[in-house]
Amino acid sequence: MDFSVLTDQFASLTFDGIALGFIYVLIALGYTMVYGVLRLINFANSEVFMLGSFATILVATKLFNHTIESDPLTGFKLVYTMTAMLVGAMIVSGVASVIIEIVAYRRLRSRTSNRLTSLISAIGVSIVLAEAVRMATSSAPMGSPRLLDKTILATVWGADIRVDTLLVIVFAIILLIVLDLFVNKSRLGMGIRAVSMDYDTSRLMGINLNKIISTTFLIGGLGTGAASFFYITVYEMTRFSIGFELGLAAFTAAVLGGIGNIRGAFAGGIALGLIEMYASAVLGTQWRSITAFVILILVLLFKPNGIFGESLQQARV
Amino acid sequence: MNKKIKASAAIVAALALSLGAFAANTASAATTVKIAYQGPLTGPEAQTGTDSIRGVKLAIKIYNATNPAVKVEIFEGDDQGDDAQGGTVGAGIAADDAVIGVLTAYSGPTIAALPSYKAKGIAIVSPSATRASLTDPTSKDYGNPVFHRIVSNDDLQGPALARVATNGVKDPTVFVVDDQSSYSVGLTKAVKLALGTAFQAGDSAAKGAVSDFSATIAKIKKEKANVVIYTGYYADGAKFLKQLRDKGYKGVYAAGDGVLNSQFPKLAGKKQSEGARLTAPTVPLEVASPKITAMFKKDFKADPGVYTTEAFDATNIFLQGIKAGKTTRADMLAYLNSASFSYKNTAGITIKFQESGDLSGSGLMNQFVVKGGTIKLNGKA
């Protein structure tokens, strides 16, 4: 136990914890959206993240011919390249997510109402994707060129506010607001909420279920793709096993906030980021996951549906 | 479609026939023996196994290209770096009568497989098993008479790493970060012991499970450490170093052989990795022999890894024995254990074994420094 590090480095740890938390939030969206609609834990979402992270790097290295030793870009070229990387990651993750839905879940859904088969199928897809990438990359990590220089914009109470972490926070907030508006205000969003509330009744009301479900997977995938882009921008490295590491954390965040609830994912992600950072500092990094899970269990003891409760229902979203 | 299948079936059949005929021909003209490699070829440790077995394959390819009387084949034994699987894989290797020597990668699986190799008298030359107990006569893991290794053991690396890390640093305050793997925990123990009072504090970040080292770095800043030692492997070590430098740390960064990988400076960044100090009982193939490195890159379209040179050398030790006519298990073992045995390795150093299976002499421990994005040999540690 070393509480002095907390007082000594508090602002720094808090800022880093929030930035990490926002990456968790974006991945957690993939779990939460699908769970809200299908009551299914889409375990393959972690590999959607992994694919997105590779896509981000490949756009930079193959499309724009940057190497790992390239110098940081500036001005219009920087914005242009980064946008392309973000869009590339989102497209790859979104498409992968929709394909996974069609291949692994849709047929099972029409044939059986047993959710357990879908769960096994989800784990299967996850293993297939991770192993395929492992073989394709010979288990080696892939580094990203540093295109956005990590300029320190300001120092607040000893914490460095860096441009890359600030970018994550700002963009994640924008994405969350857009998503919240979409689910609450748009026609498709209304459909998603209807399916989430009552599967059978919404089908009777003439809602095209498969379309709604595909849209949900697409949105979850796009959010996860954005998360992978931000992850690479900050940490600049990925490997085949990254999905497991980040996916588990994001899933924990989703459960902590209340799975199926977008605002819950937000609260859970930030909370988890901070808990991990403080626990690592005070107890040692080896206690990070243990602390996070102990807190998760305690929260679930008192609020079994997470901080914000389950489901994507109208009032809560 | 049907036609295509038929056509390809015909081709396959023809190939099989010709290959069979070829095999029959060579079998009558020359005998074939096998050298086995036991190590992680799949699973999370696969990188180490892949880097090593390529060294084995290259050595055998070069040897077979000289049209020798006795051809050599490879036996690939995949233990996933897992102790539990080591025993089974070892028994499988020992059951193949053509195998006259084996290279074992990791210490744990080597120990698990030892009974099989001892029972059949198969010589081991390990390129990378560094656990001290394997050559300790008082230990139950003692590998005599079959076990030999061409790397120094962990007892030597800890003090060397502590020495290299603090070299030239006035009032060193050292922060040690391990990755909780058994290799890392062992090395950390030896490093802390050698550091004595210079050791200030430490942290453990599980291998492959931590993306963000901010908390560890916050602690390093709080302790005002001017030397940071990382005892894990290169992927995490690079990630950690990059974040450390980006957060303004100006002191020494040092690490052990787990970090010695050509990818390390690339992943950590040219600027961030500059001046990083490494120790290892190994020599990178790029340093040992640019010529063989070129052949390696041509064959595998990849860079050599940590123990590629040692795997290449360990294989060549067996090949040297085969050239000297030692084509049975008993002859090969007696050859390696004879007092007259010596081998000149790729880096040009002459190797002899002690009775325990360790290298003669003080053992090899090198230090390296990262300059301009590449790892450069910086003499003995």
Image (spheres, coloured by chain):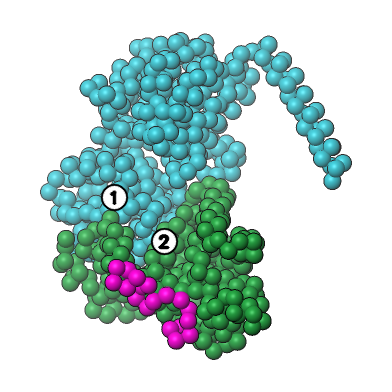
Chain colours: A green, B cyan
Residue B349 in view of the camera: no
In this rendering, does residue B157 appear at all? yes
Horizontal side of A79 relative to A250 (left or right) equals right
Same subunit: marks 2 and 1: no
| Image point (43%, 81%), residue name | A173
> Percent position (x, y) of residue B259?
37, 47
How far across and down, in percent of the image, does residue A316 sit? 43, 83
Q: CA distance from mark 2 to mark 1?
A: 22 Å
Q: Residues within 10 Å of mark 2 (few under 14, many from 20)?
A: some
Give the farthest residue toward the bottom: A185
**Which subunit holds the residue at mark 1?**
B
User: Which residue corresponds to the image point at 29% horizontal and 68% vertical from the top-left?
Assistant: A301
Q: How many marks?
A: 2
* Magenta-drawn stretch contains A272: no
B169 relative to B357, above or below: below
- Measuring 14% from the left and 45% from the top, which residue is drawn there? B196
Tag 2, which chain?
Answer: A
Q: Is residue A242 left or right of residue B192?
A: right
Q: Position of residue A228 (x, y in %)?
A: 49, 67
The circle drawn on residue B178 is: 1
Which residue is nearer to you in this view: A203 or B321?
Answer: A203
User: Which residue is disc 2 drawn over?
Assistant: A248
**Which element is circle 2 on?**
helix
Q: Secondary structure at mark 1?
A: strand
- Mark number displayed over residue B332: none
Is B274 rendered above or below residue B281?
below
Which of the two residues, B40 or B348, is positioned nearer the viewer here? Answer: B40
**Amino acid type at mark 1:** Asp
Note whether A114 is above or below B163 in the view shown: below
Q: Residue at x 68, y 16 (%)?
A: B26
Q: Marks 2 and 1: which is nearer the front?
A: 2
Which residues fall within the magenta stretch? A300-317
